[in-house]
Amino acid sequence: MQILWLDALAIGAGATAVMDVWAVALKRFWCIPSLNFAMVGRWLGHLPRGTFTHANIAQAAPVRDEAILGWTAHYAIGVLFAAVLLALVGEKWVQAPTFAPALLAGLVSVAAPFCILQPGMGAGLAASKTPHPTAARLRSLMAHTAFGIGLYLAALLWSTVR
């Protein structure tokens, strides 16, 4: 199990970084803003206080160190998704990664923002309460596709240094 977590850490952090590079490219070249991870931290910071959903997370009371909390959670969640993938495909996949399981994991992972994060932050199920739900859904799908590609690329790199 220890090797699984080291593998998950390397692959998950690498995949999350690929996702973040994609977000930077979208912002720089197409002026498409990324998710504000301080708002994710704010949402997470309110959970221990018993508040699971907000009408609009931007209007909720700020939480101390919310940006750090949000970014840390972003990478921790990436590692957890990688751990789930590795638990399903096994250690042999880490030694010789293939594209399909990684891409599928990335696509399946979009359920988390659709069903948990967006409703909790006030955007509704699958961004249904946003001004442009289809665009928001496509951005989430693209981001998680980038994460899936990142799982594969990070696993390829990790397999060479492991």
Image (cartoon, helix red, strand yellow):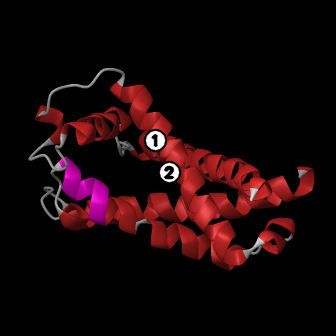
Horizontal side of residue 116 vs 131, given as left or right: right
Residue shown at 79% from the left, 55% from the top: 3
Residue 86 figure quarter? bottom right
Callout 1 amino acid: Ala
Tell me the amino acid under the disc marked 2: Ile
Q: Position of residue 48 (x, y in %)?
A: 26, 39
Q: Nearer the viewer, residue 33 or 93?
A: 93
Q: Position of residue 5 (x, y in %)?
A: 70, 53
Q: Across the whole image, how many numbered discs are drawn on residues? A: 2
Residue at numbered disc 2: 77
Residue 36: which numbered mark, if any?
none
Q: Which residues are magenta?
A: 115-121
Q: Residue furthest top?
A: 64
Is there CB contact under 8 Å for labels 2 and 1? yes
Q: Quadrant of residue 133?
A: bottom left
Tell whether position 96 is magenta.
no
Principal secondary structure, stretch drawn in magenta? helix
Residue 73 location (% of width, % of height) = 46, 41
Is residue 25 visible in the rendered image? The answer is: no
**Residue 69 is drawn in which quadrant?**
top left
Above or below, comparing residue 154 to residue 145 in the picture: above
Secondary structure at badge 1 equals: helix
Q: Residue at x 63, y 52 (%)?
A: 12
Q: Residues within 10 Å of mark 1 (few under 14, many from 20)?
A: some
Residue count near mark 2 (Cα–Cα under 10 Å), binned few <14, some 14–19, many ≥20: some
Residue at image position (18%, 43%) is 50
Residue that mark 1 sits on? 73
Compared across the picture, whether 42 is left or right of 29 comes to: left
Left or right: where 118 falls relative to 91? left
Dot 2: element? helix
- Residue at image coords 12%, 43%: 56
Residue 101 seen by the camera: yes
